[in-house]
Image (spheres, grey):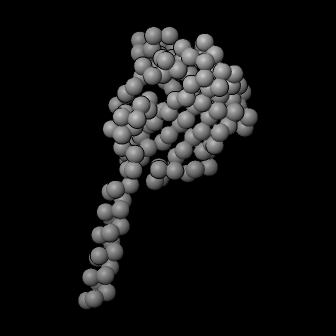
């Protein structure tokens, strides 16, 4: 009987810990100025500002935050120094994800824009590890650029 109570207590603690795994809720991300892409979009105007600064070769930094179906945050940091981009991807909060694709301060030379019927896609290219990084997709008419 005592073992059963300990087992139930242990399972209960694990369930509570699992429910509290979202340590960076979207409300906090919005408040911090992150460009939030999912589940709802927020601070999209901040991406417009970033694009203007890149065009003017002015340094700027943005954080793009998306959420998995389970509500786990995936963070992308992009730093522009006036010449090139530094890209970091942090999926450590994603309970079901693998961090094998995470990046820590990878240098990329260019930010390219592709226009489609569904909006615009922005991709960091010529990155030192050889892989391009799609950082943002806009909805039609969402960006002023």
Q: Nearer the viewer, residue 28 or 120?
A: 28
Q: Residue at x 29, y 76 (%)?
A: 9
**Which residue corresponds to the image point at 38% horizontal and 50% vertical from the top-left?**
22
Residue at the outermost bottom position? 1
Q: Is residue 30 above or below residue 97?
A: above
Q: Quadrant of the N terminus?
A: bottom left
Image spot of residue 73 (x, y percent): 44, 43
Residue 110 seen in render? no
81, 13: nearer the viewer: 81
Q: Nearer the viewer, residue 43 or 91?
A: 43
Give residue 7's quadrant in the image: bottom left
Q: Residue drawn at (42%, 40%), measured in percent from left and top?
A: 67
Please state if 122 lies on the left or on the right of 69 as rendered: right
- Number of numbered labels in the structure image: 0
Q: Nearer the viewer, residue 57 or 47?
A: 57
Return the x and y of residue 77 as percentages of the image width and height.
55, 35
Residue 129, position as x, y percentages in the image: 72, 38
Identify whether 33 is placed above or below 50.
below
| Residue 128: percent from left, percent from top | 74, 34
Q: Quadrant of residue 112?
A: top right
Q: Is residue 52 visible?
A: yes
């Amino acid at each position: 009987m005592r073992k059963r109570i300990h087992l139930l207590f242990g399972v209960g603690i694990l369930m509570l810990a699992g429910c509290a795994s979202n340590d960076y809720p979207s409300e906090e991300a919005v408040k911090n100025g992150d460009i939030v892409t999912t589940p709802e979009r927020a601070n999209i105007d901040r991406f417009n500002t970033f694009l203007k600064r890149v065009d003017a070769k002015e340094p700027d930094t943005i954080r793009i935050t998306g959420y998995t179906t389970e509500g786990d945050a995936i963070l992308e940091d992009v730093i522009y120094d006036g010449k090139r981009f530094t890209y970091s991807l942090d999926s450590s909060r994603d309970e079901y994800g693998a961090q094998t694709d995470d990046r820590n301060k990878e240098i990329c030379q260019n930010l390219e824009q592709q226009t489609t019927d569904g909006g615009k896609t922005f991709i960091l290219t010529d990155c030192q590890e050889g892989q391009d990084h799609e950082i943002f997709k806009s909805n039609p008419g969402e960006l002023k650029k």
